[in-house]
Amino acid sequence: MIRYLLYPFRSAALLLVITFTLGWMLVLQAKLMGILLGLVLLSWFFKYCFILLDAIVAGAHEPPVLSIEMVNPVDEQRPLAQALLIAGGAALAVELSKLTFPALGWLAGIALSLMLPASIAVLGMSGNIVRAAWPPELLSVMRGIGRDYAMLLASIVAVILLVSIIVSIGAPFWLGIAAVQLGFLIIFSLVGGALHEHRLELGIEYRSERERLADRNERERISERARVMDRAYSKFRVGKPLEGWQEIQSWLNLHGHAADPTDKLLLEHRAVLATAAGWDDVRPADRLTDDLIELYLARRETGRALEVVEERLASNPRYRPKNPTHATRLAELATAAGKRALRRQLTGSA
């Protein structure tokens, strides 16, 4: 948890604090004319607080850089929801104090303050204001974080006291504004850190930045593969099988080669084969099957070789391996595996 205290002091977050501090200096100089700018800065800052929380929960190593897309007023309503919850909690404590006796109001205020980090956490994860105000939901988060929740509260209190001291000693305006902003960023960093560290207990699905990048690359590769296969299919349809096969072969050569020690080429080859197996022209899929069988047999992955043959025969019962040696070897493997029907299909015997 301690390392999250320093998170807002990294480049992107620190640059934001400096920029917004200069903005608040302009607001002070402009007086009434600066009210609109002040509201914009206030809105953008607290939206960034939740964006920072999201990034930490997701395992980001650096704070995100604020962008126009992030501060879209339509997409990001969590700061407003949190402000309403805090205002509602304060009003509840005041009313209890008036309607009953002051001690009860103070107790309610203290209890709500203790649950505030949990409320920020729930709102940050779900964006649901009702869940962020529902005591059983908040208690569930507090239990999930466990003893670190006490450390979280202690750290927040320490940050608030430190910022209060800086502001109360008559520090320059710019230093007080910077301290307040850093204080909020530290609080949101700590809440995000608590969620990240206890993501398993809280049931938070976590994917690292590297995993998210890999997912994005995979989606792009699948999309590009589909375009290549569409081009290849059109070539076969217009009677240009050689050009169609060159499209397929170029794609496979780009994403691996027969000597690749990993399974990457074979997975890509099978993905291409799965697409070609749905075409009305059986030649591309038959040839891909032959190539794939050769690769699997070379690696002594005989089970996968039989699997590929069975899948191809299911879509093209007339398929036979072009290489007689492969056909004989596959028939022997089918016999050893007790797959008599497959052996008969390969050998053409009754």
Image (cartoon, rainbow, N blue to C red):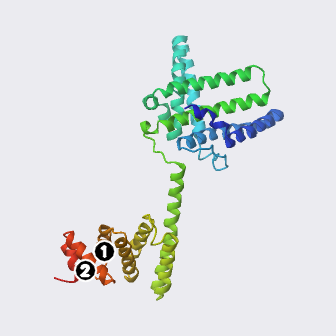
Q: Position of residue 40 (x, y in %)?
A: 71, 40
68 vs 111: above or below = below
Marks 1 & 2, CB-CB < 8 Å contact:
yes
Residue 26 placement: quadrant: top right
Q: Position of residue 181 (x, y in %)?
A: 68, 33
Which residue is nearer to you in this view: 78 or 268? 268
Label number found at residue 113: none
343 sits left or right of 125 in the view: left
Q: Secondary structure at mark 1?
A: helix
Q: Secondary structure at mark 2?
A: helix
Q: How far, Cα to Cα, is label 1 from label 2?
A: 9 Å
Q: Amino acid at mark 2?
A: Leu
Q: Residue at x 75, y 38 (%)?
A: 18
Mark 2, residue position: 346
313 vs 119: above or below = below
Which residue is nearer to you in this view: 260 or 103? 260
Q: Residue at x 18, y 69 (%)?
A: 338
Visible residue check, residue 319: no
Q: Position of residue 340 (x, y in %)?
A: 18, 74
